[in-house]
Image: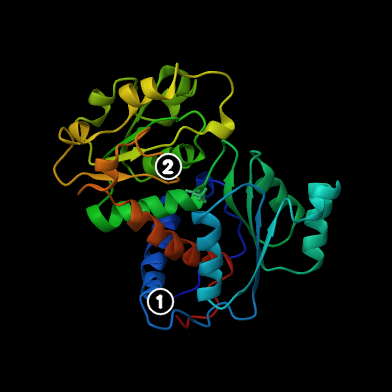
Amino acid sequence: MASDMALSGKSLVSMEDLSADQIMQILSTAALMKEISEREVKKAPTLRGRTVINFFAEPSTRTRTSFEIAGKRLSADVINISASSSSLSKGETLKDMAANLQAMKPDLLVARSPHSGVPYMMSQWMTCPVINAGDGRHEHPTQSLLDLMTIQERKKDMEGLKVTILGDILNSRVARSNMIAMTKLGMIVTACGPATMLPMNISRMAHHHTTDVAEAVRGADVVMALRIQKERLEGCKFPNVREYSRYFGLTAAHMKHTASNSIVLHPGPINQGVEISPEVVEGPWSVIMNQVTNGVAVRMAALYLLLGGAQPQV
Ligand code: CP
């Protein structure tokens, strides 16, 4: 696997940081990395001697676990810290924490925060690359990369695909990263949700937007359902969950009007029966568990490429 000087040493805070070619390079590297996870002994020496710190200041199942697995499968030394178990809880500032972590000479920091901009600030205060593992409403670039990898596995050519992103677009960092990346790759993006959950500038982020789910999913190749981001809701955006589910929940009836061989993605965690029905989660369209599997491969690829891709043994 050739090293890549363009990604080596860089931080990944936003999908704006990547060109279409760099996105495709990460996806092709991830396809190679996926093979390691299919071996009986799931380990390669590629990042031996490298230290990766995972700093998660917000709950996570998929992202945190997959970054830890990704680092360990490539033989990096992986250290996990949370806000509550760090000295942030004793009043230390984020900037002081960054300086102290830097003094321990990590090779890469993975950072999740409830606040938009924290991974960017960490990337300014530290000399090692920083990967944004989700910051507030802002972005979740590695989620977008694993979504793209899952779409590419099923659809091969991504250019021209019709993608519908459905739900709480306003508060979703997954939607924001995907709208940036998907438009870069030539996909046609429709955003759909209650008017109160569509950003003011949605017409600059997606090709189409609507509040009508039936219209949004008609002919779609890919449908991505999003959870209501309760932790980031400000004020009441809809009357109640039952009404939200009735008007904006994705059902098997909707899927009958999508393109043939359409697929359904969901970044998780899922609130079944709210934004998506159990029959869609379990149905033939669902690639939701493929997304989770690909999360490990994409994060292995991101660690490998940002750390220089120096040692080719995979
Ligand atoms: N998709 C995602 O970011 O899930 P977690 O919050 O569990 O990491």
Q: Quadrant of residue 53?
A: bottom right
Identify the residue at image location x=23%, y=25%.
214
| Picture colour scheme | rainbow
* Residue 34 locus on image (x, y percent): 38, 70
Q: Quadrant of the C terminus?
A: bottom left
Relative image position of residue 296 (x, y in whole percent): 45, 64
- Residue 18 in view: no
User: Along the polypeptide, which appears first: circle 2 or circle 1?
Assistant: 1
Circle 1 SS class: helix
Left or right? Give the position of 214 relative to 24. left
Q: Nearer the viewer, residue 265 or 131?
A: 265
Q: Vertical placement of 158 versus 234: above or below?
A: below
Q: Name above or below for residue 72 compared with residue 269.
A: below
Percent coordinates x, y for residue 109 in the rendering: 66, 60
- The answer to whether residue 84 is left or right of residue 185 is right
Q: Which residue is mark 2?
A: 178
Q: Is residue 58 above or below residue 126?
A: above
* Residues packed near mark 1 inside 10 Å, few (<14), some (14 to 19) or many (20 plus): some
Quarter placement of the N terminus: bottom left
The amino acid type, in three-letter code, at marker 1 is Ile
Q: Nearer the viewer, mark 2 or mark 1?
A: 1
Disc 1: which residue? 36
Q: CA distance from mark 2 to mark 1?
A: 26 Å
- The reply to whether the residue tagged 1 has its Cβ within 8 angstroms of ligand 1 is no
Amino acid type, residue under disc 2 in the picture: Asn
Residue 103 in sight:
yes
